[in-house]
Image (cartoon, rainbow, N blue to C red):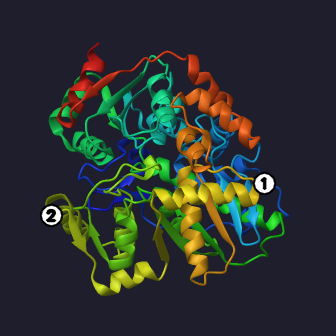
Amino acid sequence: MRYLSTRGGAPVTAAEAVLNGLSPDGGLYVPEMIPQAAPAWTDPAVPMTYQQLAAEVLALYFPDFGADALQEMCRQAYAGFASQEVTPVSRLDEKTWLLELFHGPTLAFKDVALQLLPRLVARAALLRGEQRTIHILTATSGDTGKAALEGFRDVPGTACTVFYPDKGVSDLQYRQMATSRGSNVQVVAVRGNFDAAQTGVKRLFADPDFRARLDAAGRLPSSANSINIGRLVPQIAYYFYGYRALRQRGALQAGDTLDVCVPTGNFGDILAAWYARRMGLPLGRLVCASNRNRVLTDFLTSGVYDADRPFYKTISPSMDILISSNLERLLFELSGRDAAQVRAWMAALSTQKRFALPGELHAAFQAEFDAGAADDDRTRDAIRDTFRAHGTLVDPHTAVGLAVMSELRAGGASRLTLVNATASPYKFVSDVSAALGLPVTGRVFDDARALAAATGTALPPAIAALETADILHRAVVDPQDMGQAVLDSVTR
């Protein structure tokens, strides 16, 4: 299996794609062909753990890594998850199930891929004979950062720098990152929003002087964002596992169509569902749920991607994004893998902050995707209504998905839907408490304990431990100084 750049660069091996993160031409890597799933993956009569299923998915995309090695990676990566199923499903109502993706060490869906990525990176370096330290450069809107820091912490042969928007994440997301330990990790706040941080990271990858200075220091830059194909592929597995689990629970029969609803800002999580469907999983509508920063919803509705708009800080900060990187992969696939056209669209987005699809391509998007958006008020309503009706506490991102699904149901959507539950509500304790009408003191750990008492839910130990953890990372830089912050950490 080789990997192609969405902008037409030379094909590379799977190991090179994982190590590079981003293609030298600025494009994202996609597999040269989409492999087909084995029927056993969704057959509950065939015994299979999540770890085994994930390893089989990975083996199709990264065959050179070795089936036995991938099985061991998956066993190690998911050993610390709170659920033995890794990504269990839970019933909300007759037509709605939650795919629980928050049982990893940092309580967010990013753990599913980022507990595995360091092992993929280490294996890729071994296969390539790479002697340099792999230096992970990552931008985060909240959850990727801590998951990357936790995954790469003290992993030999790696280093990890995480950039996040200053004052643009929740209090607990900030504390998760700022208290991160590890001799090889660095956390830096960037003045501006997430798009400033993400664009800054992309510029570093494309900057030959920066890469040369890192090389001189014995470092090879790579990424833990979902621009890295090693982040994206592991996410495919949980859609197969969710379908399989629903068959085990009697909610689906073999071949039944399942819709999925994904709250997303960077488009990676829903793109993984698209790949799963192309591999043969019988998914129906792919519902893209946006918050007030509804750039993806507007794009899927109108065919025009317009990032020249106000940026809003919302109570679902991991979705506060205007430049959705992974959309580039789908543009490449649905345009017939037209790299020249993708380059033109991305150039227009960079210079004019917008591009428009031709009518037939917009129709191709609409044939597969539905879209909707929920502002903060509707998100709060969904948190409150879900708890009152079902006794289930959800975080604001999951609530965006539920609000959008509620609107689609009102419009006639009727099929069984799996909604991605992307994070623990305790990562967003102030906003969840306020949505339920509970007093919010601003003392986040007092509020967390009050939320647990009022709802009868358990305060996660990983959240409680943050109360006494020392703040270790305080750096704040302007976007143009991100590269120097990395280089300073290398020479210290």
Closer-to-camera residue (167/328): 167
Whether 132 is drawn above or below 1: the answer is: above
- Looking at the image, the residue that sits furthest to the top is 492
**Which amino acid lies under the numbered mark 2 shown in the image of this protein?**
Gln
Closer-to-camera residue (336/183): 183
Query: Helix, strand, or loop for circle 2?
Result: helix
The x and y percentages for residue 264 are 47, 58
Is residue 424 visible to us here?
A: no
Query: Helix, strand, or loop for circle 1?
Result: loop
Q: Using residue 143 as the reference point, say whether residue 236 is left or right of it.
A: right
Whether 416 is drawn above or below 485: the answer is: below
Is residue 191 visible to us here?
A: yes
Q: Quadrant of residue 31?
A: bottom left
Kindly identify the residue that appears in the image at 17 percent across and 35 percent down: 480
Residue identifier under label 1: 48
Residue identifier under label 2: 352
Q: Quadrant of residue 32?
A: bottom left
Q: Tag 1: Cα neighbours inside 10 Å, few (<14), some, or many (≥20)?
A: some
Q: Using residue 437 as the reference point, say whether residue 320 is left or right of it.
A: left
Q: Nearer the viewer, mark 2 or mark 1?
A: 2
Kindly identify the residue that appears in the image at 47 percent across and 37 percent down: 121
Q: Quadrant of the C terminus?
A: top left
**Which amino acid lies under the numbered mark 1 shown in the image of this protein?**
Met
The x and y percentages for residue 354 are 22, 67
The x and y percentages for residue 73 are 62, 38
How many callouts does the rendering have?
2
Q: Using residue 48 as the reference point, say whether residue 118 is left or right of it.
A: left
Whether 407 is drawn above or below 217: the answer is: below
The x and y percentages for residue 490 are 30, 19
Q: Tag 2: Cα neighbours inside 10 Å, few (<14), some, or many (≥20)?
A: few
Measured in 3D between alpha carbons, the distance from the residue under mark 2 to the one under mark 1, in whole angstroms, is 49 Å
